[in-house]
Amino acid sequence: MVKQKGILWIIGVIALLLLFGYVLATAIAVFLGRGIPTGGNIALIPIHGVILSTGASSPFGDAVASSTKIVEFIKQADKNPSVKAIIFDINSPGGSGVASDEIATAIRKTNKTTVSFIREVGASGAYWVASSTDYVLVNKLSYTGSIGVLASYLEFSGLLTDYNVTYQRLVAGKYKDIGTPWKKLTDEERNLIQEQLGDAHEIFIEEVAENRGLSVEVVRRLATGQPIMGYRAKELGLVDSIGGKDEAIRFVEEMYNITADVAEYKQKVTLLDMLASVFSQGFYRMGLGIGYGLKQEQPMYVWT
Amino acid sequence: MKKKMVINAPIAKRLLAFIIDLAIIDLIVAISFQGLLRNLVPATSIAQTYKAVTMGPPKGMYAILLSAGLIAFLYFYIIEGKTGQSIGKRIMRVKVVSQKDSAWGHILRNLFIIPFMPFILLWIIDPVFMLLNEDNQRLTEYLGKTKVVEEISW
């Protein structure tokens, strides 16, 4: 009887240790948040949401594809000897020119075969990223292309006047407050911004031309900023094939004569990331004011 | 009428008991951490695992090691402290006895299981001391006044 009690008691302790282990594992996973697996022969990296340099998706805001994290994923996949190819799952309207270029540059630097497939949207900066991969697939109804840049914003000088509010301009450097929504944009300032947009546009065109093996003139003709549907993008040579994830995986399998073991490099959001994002978005919107807090309105921010 | 005698547990029996306990602890850790480990360590092949690990320990590995050490420590401390016998010792019919039953003695004897410095040094010091000690005690057992014995009857 004593022996039986001892055995039951030991089983109970083992069960409690198992439970304790689960609690510890969960705690580590929550605070780690990293989604870099070390297995698999195909790395799948999602690019979902607006492409920005930093930031994480929050439950209260837009999805964000952080170029910092994506570049890190690309580097890790590149270092992993078991990974044969990297597939990018793209569903993004684009975003910051800098962030898009960071990802595109990291893709070009990798030694692995890169494949991208565009889902609903792979436009502007997201198309820039897709075009830098070795093989691009798109759904026939996807929206892609949109090769252009924008820096539009809402200007509130009239509203201030209506409410008898004055913008007190105090600057050292005459273009220091260029693009502020609290005053009218002068012709000189407009021309300055437009010139910079033109330069950014030209860089975008040249990048796509080089990536896709098209002439700059051909791409420039297509670079009106208009979104192009997938089937049309194929006809124009902006993408390689109509297809999705399955076709992208099959492409890699046939190229390397392997059976795919796909490891998804998720941009896991830790509890701390979510809290930071909520607070930073809140302070960001408060700090910039109502006009800046409007969705997709970023003065002097070049968007592709 | 059977005669009984208590002798110092042979080192071989102690070693076997420890291997059994280690297997049980590994099972507990593997089951609890399987989700986390699947993300950190590749399951493709031993060669790939070796390559991945030598690229540098994945982030979180130290936390997992510490957790495994803590689970192992609690396994021995709770079970041996309460019953005198871990599962491995129960199977090998040896048990822990204490000159003065104190929690400190049980803590000391199980410090070697913690996988970080300076406790890792006990992996060398303890066995060497055991070989030189007439009661087959490890250093931490000697300091904590515990030892492992076997009850034989004939």
Image: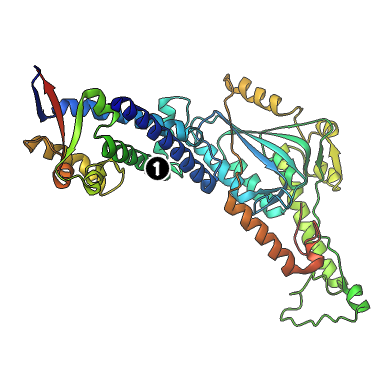
Vertical placement of A108 versus A135: above or below?
below
Front-lying residue, B84 or A239? B84
Vertical placement of B122 versus A158: above or below?
above
Q: Position of residue A197 (x, y in %)?
A: 79, 59
Quarter of the image where the N terminus of chain A is located: top left
Q: What residue lies at 45% left-to-right and 44% top-to-bottom? A: B60
Vertical placement of A109 versus B1: above or below?
below
Residue at numbered disc 1 = B67
**Residue A104 visible somewhere in the drawing:** yes
Front-lying residue, A240 or A99? A99
Please give the chain letter of the residue carrying mark 1. B
Q: How many marks?
A: 1
Name the image quarter holding residue A162: bottom right
Q: Position of residue B131 (x, y in %)?
A: 10, 35
Q: Position of residue A249 (x, y in %)?
A: 65, 26
Using residue A78 as the reference point, say whether residue B130 is left or right of it: left
Badge 1 marks a residue whose secondary structure is helix
- The amino acid type, in three-letter code, at marker 1 is Ser
Name the image quarter holding residue A85: top right
Using residue A5 as the reference point, say whether residue A235 is left or right of it: right
Using residue A42 as the reference point, say whether residue A177 is left or right of it: right
Q: Position of residue A61 (x, y in %)?
A: 73, 52
